[in-house]
Structures are given as structure tokens and as C-alpha cells.
């Protein structure tokens, strides 16, 4: 059986360094005053969508973004430092104009996989931690789909229809591997990761791509992708690509599991190249507050 799943990736709102086009990686800046207005479209797009799991970078600009766009999801969010932006070391807070004449900087722009900002994070380190986070999110996604299958089976056994209102609540303790499924009609079921993951698979790539995220958008890179079927971004999303969390589950356009990830531009670009075959790291524009949707049919 195949089930549609969706990852909704949201880039944080604008900070002072974003506005000044400075390199912003590990530095923990707040959003600019008035960010509620800038993030209004993001909040509108995400409103009324059901999310079975929520992940967020632990940096304050991402935490504040989640508060502004979906404060109701705070109780189930998992803050994950692996979703932080690349650390640019001594180049944090610098502009392209300030760095453009440095030989190491020029070399890094041409081959970021072979050069590292002084005191900063190498491409391999960045790639490894984001890939690790992707694998864990993928594993949870598979568990959520299996939990939804069990919920639908319980509906059938009880003689109730799939349009009956239901809710999935996931354990927010990152150290556990248990999903608790709460159904408004049937008794609560508990599914462990070992049982729920059987027969399901979302592959995460293991290559060593090139490229890096700069909030000023000055470097480039490519990376072969993996298994998400397609991607949409705000501005190009068709009506069939946006959903209400209350639609019947038998409607094939409604994801059986939807996961929200609030993170940084470089992380979103890398996750997209890991999960989307043929997608380049620098494909398309990605502004603050933008939303990228990655969708696939998962075999269970």
C-alpha cells in the first residue's frame, strides 16, 4: 500500500543580519521587530493544516518564527541543534564586500567541500549532521504512517468512517521511540518504532555533495537527491497542493502524515537535495519566511 507523506520546510523570518546581507550561521539573533507582518503569509499558508510532528532548529530566530506562524504547535515541537545553519566561524557577521578579496574566501566560494571558514564548520560536518536529522525525521514519518494505518484499521473494525474526526499525538521526548495514537472514537493504541517501521522506507542519500548556505546567497553547489517525489514552494503551489487537516483520509491528495520543519536556508537547500532526485543546492530562490513542500508516496 502506498501513502502520501509531506514535509513542510519553513525558513525563519528576517533578522538584522539578513536585512544587511551579512553571513548568518551559528550566531543566535532574534527576528526583526515587525516580523509578524512579514510572516503573515507564512502563517496564512500553514493555518488549519494538521501536523503529526514538528521539528525546529534550537536557534532563537527559528523558535520565534514557529511562535509567530503556528503557536498552537509549540506543545509537540522537538528542538534539534542538528537543524542549525552552517557555522561560518570568523566570517559570521561579515558581508561579501568585506570578504571578497581574501584568498581563502575566494577558494571556499569555488569549492566549499575542500575549504572551511576559519574557525567555522566544514562542509562534511554540515552535511553529516543535517543528513542525520533527515534520517531521524524520515524514520518518524514512517512510524506515523504505520500508526495512521492502524487507526484506519480500528475505524473499519469499529464500523466508523474515515471522515470521523481523529488526532495523532506524538511523544515529544526525543530520547524515546514510542508513538502514542489518540483516536476520538477508539481506544488509545501505542506503537513502538520497531513494530511501526516494518515495511516502510524513506531513503536518505549518503553522497558528499558540495555547496553551503549563506544568508546573503553568494555561493553555489550541487548535490544529487534521493526519494521525495516532488517539491512546491510558495508562489507556485497549486490548489491541489494545499490541504485542510480535516479532509477525509481516503482523498489521495491529503497526506497521511505531514511533518513541519522550521529551520534555516542552507538546511532546507541541503534537505531538498538529499530528498529530491536531480535537485541542485542552489536551485530556485529561498527568502526568509518561505515555505518548501516535499512530498512522496511511501510504501508500507
Image (spheres, rainbow, N blue to C red):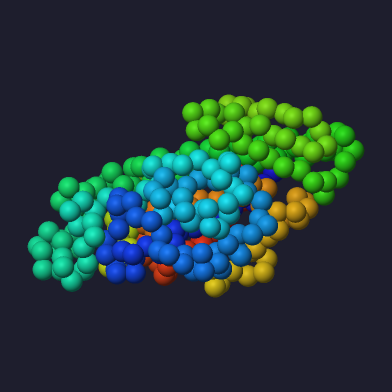
Q: Viewer-proximal residue, 12 or 28?
A: 28
Residue 253 located left or right of residue 8: right
Q: Viewer-proximal residue, 174 or 163?
A: 174
Q: Quadrant of the C terminus?
A: top right
Residue 135 located left or right of residue 154: left
Tell me which corner region of the image, top left, top right, bottom left or bottom right, holds residue 229.
bottom right
Instruction: Residue 112: give x, y in percent of width and height.
Output: 23, 56
Residue 11 located left or right of residue 187: left
In this orientation, does residue 183 appear?
yes
Count numbered badges in the picture: 0
Residue at the spot x=47%, y=65% of the render? 35
In this orientation, does residue 275 appear?
no
Vertical order, 297 against 237 (above or below) = above
Residue at the spot x=24%, y=60% of the render? 93
Q: Quadrant of the N terminus?
A: top right
Instruction: Residue 245: give x, y in percent of width and height.
Output: 70, 54
Instruction: Residue 39: give x, y in percent of width and height.
Output: 51, 65
Q: Viewer-proximal residue, 236 or 168?
A: 168
Residue at the spot x=41%, y=45% of the render? 58
Residue at the spot x=55%, y=38% of the render? 140
Q: Residue furthest front?
A: 33
Amino acid at each position: 500500500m502506498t501513502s502520501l507523506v509531506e514535509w513542510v520546510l519553513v525558513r525563519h523570518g528576517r533578522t538584522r543580519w539578513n536585512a544587511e546581507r551579512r553571513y548568518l550561521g551559528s550566531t543566535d539573533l532574534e527576528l526583526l521587530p515587525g516580523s509578524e507582518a512579514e510572516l503573515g503569509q507564512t502563517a496564512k499558508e500553514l493555518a488549519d493544516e494538521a501536523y503529526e510532528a514538528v521539528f525546529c532548529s534550537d536557534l532563537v530566530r527559528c523558535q520565534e518564527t514557529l511562535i509567530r506562524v503556528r503557536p498552537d504547535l509549540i506543545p509537540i515541537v522537538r528542538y534539534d541543534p542538528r537543524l542549525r545553519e552552517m557555522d561560518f566561524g570568523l566570517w559570521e557577521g561579515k558581508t561579501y564586500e568585506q570578504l571578497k578579496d581574501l584568498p581563502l574566501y575566494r577558494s571556499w566560494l569555488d569549492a566549499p567541500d575542500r575549504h572551511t571558514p576559519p574557525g567555522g564548520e566544514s562542509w562534511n560536518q554540515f552535511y553529516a549532521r543535517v543528513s542525520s536529522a533527515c534520517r531521524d525525521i524520515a524514520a518518524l514519518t514512517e512510524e506515523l504512517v504505520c500508526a495512521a494505518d492502524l487507526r484506519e484499521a480500528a475505524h473499519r473494525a469499529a464500523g466508523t468512517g474515515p471522515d470521523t474526526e481523529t488526532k495523532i499525538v506524538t511523544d515529544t521526548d526525543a530520547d524515546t521511540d514510542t508513538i502514542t495514537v489518540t483516536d476520538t472514537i477508539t481506544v488509545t493504541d501505542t506503537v513502538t518504532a520497531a513494530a511501526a517501521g516494518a515495511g516502510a522506507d524513506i531513503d536518505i542519500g549518503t553522497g558528499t555533495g558540495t555547496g553551503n548556505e549563506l544568508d546573503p546567497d553568494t555561493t553555489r553547489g550541487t548535490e544529487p537527491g534521493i526519494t521525495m517525489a516532488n517539491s512546491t514552494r510558495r508562489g507556485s503551489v497549486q490548489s491541489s497542493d494545499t490541504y485542510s487537516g480535516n479532509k477525509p483520509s481516503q482523498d489521495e491528495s491529503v497526506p497521511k502524515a505531514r511533518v513541519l520543519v522550521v529551520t534555516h536556508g542552507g538546511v532546507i537547500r541541503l534537505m531538498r537535495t538529499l530528498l529530491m532526485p536531480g535537485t541542485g543546492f542552489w536551485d530556485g530562490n529561498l527568502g526568509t519566511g518561505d515555505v518548501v513542500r516535499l512530498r512522496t508516496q511511501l510504501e508500507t
